[in-house]
Image (spheres, grey):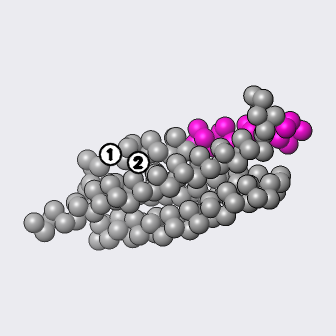
Amino acid sequence: MAFDRVKEILSQLTKEHIELLKESEEIEKQLEENFSEEAIDRALKFIHEKVNKHAEIEENDLDEALQEAGITDFDIEALNFGHRTLDEIAEHLEYLADLYKKGERKYRGRDLQKEIAKTFHEFAQTLKDHFTEEEHFFFPDILKYDLERFE
């Protein structure tokens, strides 16, 4: 049944939210307490490999499953908007990381290490807010389609 696939994907995404938030907290702590290029690389790898893969599942697999289930009026773009915001923060983090790796230690007169840690914190907080929005608004909105069929 097509709707079962939608529910399966939503369940998988919700589990991933917990794992991704836990790892983002660990990276935040590392950037604040044990700053190093390794910590920067871990943060960037986390974003590029794990968060982006998660976003792809939402944007592609979930969208495809919704279409297959006949749910054509759910606004997937509202979900994707949060991803664009995260992408913008990640781009700024990459820029700061490049400066640091080139030997810079200041950014606009401020300590570059603190700016990198602050920017990753902003990314992690935005990620958390985005997941909350998905779990409290978007996912229940999708699940109501199944309930409406039985009303």
Which residue is farthest left?
Answer: 151
Tell which of 11 and 121 is nearer to you.
121
151 vs 17, nearest the viewer: 17
Disc 2 marks a residue whose amino acid type is: Leu
**Residue bearing the label numbered 1:** 75
Q: Name, please, the residue furthest toward the top.
A: 108
Looking at the rendered structure, the number of numbered marks drawn on it comes to 2
x then y, percent, for residue 79: 41, 48
Query: Label 2's element?
Result: helix
Q: Residue most toward the right?
A: 103
Tell me if residue 101 is in the magenta stretch.
yes
Q: Residue 17, percent across and down?
A: 50, 63
Q: Determine which residue is flagged by label 2.
A: 79
Three-letter residue code for mark 1: Asp
Within 10 Å of the Cα at label 1, are there few (<14), some (14-19), or many (20+) other Cα atoms? few
Q: Main secondary structure of the magenta part?
A: helix
Tell me the crowding category of disc 2: few under 14, some 14 to 19, or many 20 or more residues within 10 angstroms, Cα based: some
Q: Quadrant where the C terminus lies?
A: bottom left
State the image coordinates of residue 108 (x, y, percent, origin top left): 75, 28
At a point 72% along the width and 41% down the height, the residue shown is: 115
The answer to the question of whether label 2 and label 1 lie on touching residues, with beta carbons closer than 8 A, is yes
Name the side, left or right, on which 91 lies relative to 12: right
For the point 65% across and 48% down, the residue is 120
Q: Quadrant of residue 94?
A: top right
Stretch of the chain drawn in magenta: 87-105
- Circle 1 SS class: loop
Work out whether 42 lies above or below 15.
above
Left or right of residue 83: residue 94: right
Residue visible at 37% across and 47% down?
76
Please tell me which residue is depicted at 59% across the width and 46% down the height of the picture.
122
